[in-house]
Amino acid sequence: QLIGRGDMLITKGSDMVRVQCAFVDTPEVDEITEFISEQQSFGSAFLLPEYSDESESGGIEIDLKKRDALFDDAARLIVAHQQGSTSLIQRKFSIGYNRAGKIIDQMEAAGIVGPFQGSKARDVLVPDEYTLEQILKRLDNE
């Protein structure tokens, strides 16, 4: 038997379970809705900052002085194809995922590709090979 006012039955498999929860009547919901609607609002939508997971690169500072031996060639490949993907580096240089991933992380630290975007290829931030060569010279001089 249900007592009412927040008392209910929920089916769990073939059994019925009696639960008690807070009872909120329609006039109370109307009052809360009215209270919220009277609050000061923003002129435009309030946008929250995007979430940035700092653990993606392991939270470790990448030392660009200790770049991979294939870094320059891989950077040229990425800029030429305008597609920053780990799998492209793996296929073209016949290397494993971990090494290709480290090269991509180094390129991100150097500003050649954008941040990780899930399963999509990273944005290539360098428009042409001339600009890339300038970046590579700067990295060699540091």
Image (spheres, rainbow, N blue to C red):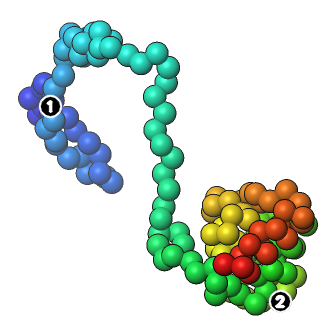
Which dot, 2 or 1, sits closer to the camera? 2
Q: Amino acid at mark 1?
A: Ala
**Is 38 above or below relative to 51?**
above
Q: Amino acid at mark 2?
A: Ser
Taking the spot 22% from the left edge, 38% from the top edge, the residue there is 9
Q: Position of residue 133 (x, y in %)?
A: 85, 70
Taking the spot 84% from the left edge, 62% from the top edge, the residue there is 131
Note whether residue 101 is visible. no
- Image quarter where the C terminus lies is bottom right
**Is 101 above or below relative to 1?**
below
Which residue is at the front of the view, 78 or 131?
131
Which residue is at the front of the view, 128 or 21?
128
Residue most extreme to the left: 3
Q: Position of residue 27 (x, y in %)?
A: 21, 10
Q: Position of residue 80 (x, y in %)?
A: 91, 66
Taking the spot 83% from the left edge, 89% from the top edge, the residue there is 94
Residue 22's disc is: 1
Q: SS for tag 1? A: loop
79 sits to left or right of 37: right
- Is the residue marked by circle 2 packed among few (<14), some (14-19), or many (20+) residues within 10 Å? few
Return the residue at label 2: 94
Which residue is at the front of the view, 18 or 100?
100
- Image quarter where the N terminus lies is top left
126 sits to left or right of 98: right
Sequence-wise first label, 2 or 1: 1
**Is 35 above or below relative to 12?**
above
